[in-house]
Amino acid sequence: MPSPTRRTLLAAAAALGLLGGIGTASAAEELRILAWQGYADDDWVAEFEKETGAKVSVVYAQTDDEIWSKIKGSEGEDFDLFAVNTSELQRYIDAGLAVPHDLSKIPNQAKTLPQFRDLSQVRGVTRDGKVYGIPFAFDSIGLIYDTTKVSPPPDSMSVLWDPKYKGKILLYDASAHNFSFAALAEGIETPFNLTDAQLQELKAKLIELQKNALSYYQSADEALQIYNSNDVALIFANFGQQQLKAMKDAGAPIAYVVPKEGALAWLDTWALSKGAKNPDLAEKWVNFVVQEKISDALTKRNGFGNTVTPLASAGGNDKLVYLLPVEDFQKRSDLWNEVKAAAQ
Amino acid sequence: MALPLAGFLAYSFFRVEGGAIVHEPGLANYARFFGEGVFLPVFARTCLLAAEVAAITLLIGYPVAIWLATLEGQRKLAMTLAFAVPLLMSYIIKIYAIRAILGGQGWLNRLLLWSGLTTAPIEALLFNLTAVLITLSALLLPFTILPIFVALERIPRNLYEASADLGGTAWTTFRHVVWPLSRSGALIGASFTFVLAMGDFVTPQMVGGMSGITFGRIVYSQFGLAFNWPFGAALSVVLTLVVLAVLWLAAVFGRLPGAAR
């Protein structure tokens, strides 16, 4: 066999160099997060990247639906950590898409507010003694009203059905919540576990509500934009105090009320994905954001509650009904389509 | 490209039980589409809406394309670009802009009130099917204009002169020369617009208000928490078949005698 030519040696050296290059590139760990806007701000990411030397990539979702389809659709492989509501988390656990946290890696969790410190007391985050979701942010789903257009100040969601405000109402386009809040307004004590008869009755009520409304919205920004160029008096505040803050900051003369029959409330947590490539790094991120500095910034920037510092605007007498998994997502979605189609 | 479509077709025969997809073939989804009372009416209305959008863009787009074809040099280039550039803009941003214009307190109403043409804001321009019609027509207009423009450009100049020499008026020239030779361009443009309007689920959501549910929206809702991919796939297959039928018809009519090849 002839001795290697110079060209072959150069090619081999180049190949080795390339392999070496690829090797060092993959040595930097990567954290892939799927979250709501406001849960992974750029400056927090930059600080975390500096502290750990890892690279963080964040994808934002706008609805619960989207998170489910991204995680289920990729069987957990596309993300390491995702933000998920306590009412949805059980579904992910059932599907094996969320895996238990290692609390020993999240020391800051022990310094959260009393109601979040004992995770066995927080409904929806545990299963068989293991913790699947670390609480991070919460808010109520109340009613926003324009103080110059609505008087007297409303105290129940039933004001949305008042013909006085026909064409001046904004609703949130999502099946589950609409049936739940309508159930509360009707005085039903189990809004997340409705019988077929109740669902049909509420469907009729929601069709009536539709006739009173102006439009749907899907994001807090969108609600504000519609409010700005149209005559809107009442908004079903799916994004609660966050929405309130954004509209107030924009100068709108609005106020917030938690209805007397109770407001739906959500608690968002961080869940570890089945396909997490680097679970330790994911736990580091959770520990990082559950520290007072970051959690406080979360509230200051967005308006909703965090698990470390108390929230000034939440009233002590507010009746909050934390979201639970509904009896049948698919059924509610189909019925909601029927509600929307009926408004022709 | 055939593989994802084949996958969709396969999925449309499966079903969902208890939140998981059951891979057993069956016609349940199609039976549901035709049987349950909500889907066919919405589908029919969406077809009608898309046809209206195609008709409107044709009525507006054709004269615009003719006008563009009569321009010369720099002006022609500039004006053609003016109609093509919106295609480069983000779809959602355009809808946001239109929504801000059409609202009760939006720009259009403010202009009308200020100029004295109206005394009260017109509320009927937004959050209904009319708004969807207006918005889709505005968004899809370039898709109709451009194919017609291209077809017109291909007509040799000397045909116009020949027609004039033979004593033809502008209308006769149009009827016997321009229309037959640009008809296929018009059909292509109109069918593109129809197809795009059929599948759109963003525009109805953003400007359709309470009556703005279209078929695209129903398909979209199957892929979220409802997690009913098989049904969504079946709905998509129906949509695809109708769209293919329309495109095929356009191709057939475009080849009738007298049309440009």
Image (cartoon, coloured by chain):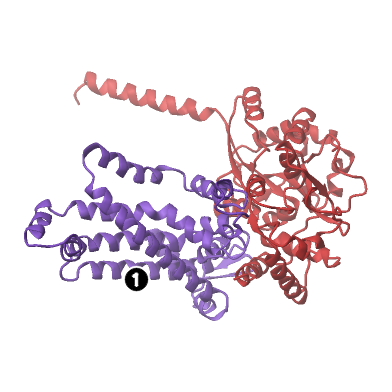
Chain colours: A red, B purple
- In this view, B257 is above or below B77: below
Q: Residue A186's image quarter?
A: bottom right
Mark 1 neighbour density, 10 Å: few (under 14) some (14–19) many (20 or more): few
In terms of depth relative to the viewer, which is nearer, B98 or A16?
A: B98
Q: Residue A109's image quarter?
A: top right
Q: Residue B38's image quarter?
A: bottom right
Image quadrant where one finds the C terminus of chain B: bottom left
The spot of residue A114 in percent (x, y) is 89, 40
The spot of residue B14 in percent (x, y) is 51, 71
Report the residue at 54% width, 81% height from top.
B35
Q: Is residue B261 visible?
A: no
Tag count in the figure?
1
The chain identifier of the residue carrying mark 1 reads: B
Q: Which residue is mark 1?
A: B245
Report the residue at 52% width, 62% height from top.
B130
- Which residue in the rendered view is the most extreme toward the front? B116
Tell me if B31 is positioned left or right of A95 in this view. left
In terms of depth relative to the viewer, which is nearer, A290 or B157?
A: B157
- Which element is circle 1 on? helix
Q: Is residue B183 visible?
A: yes
- In this view, B117 is above or below A135: below
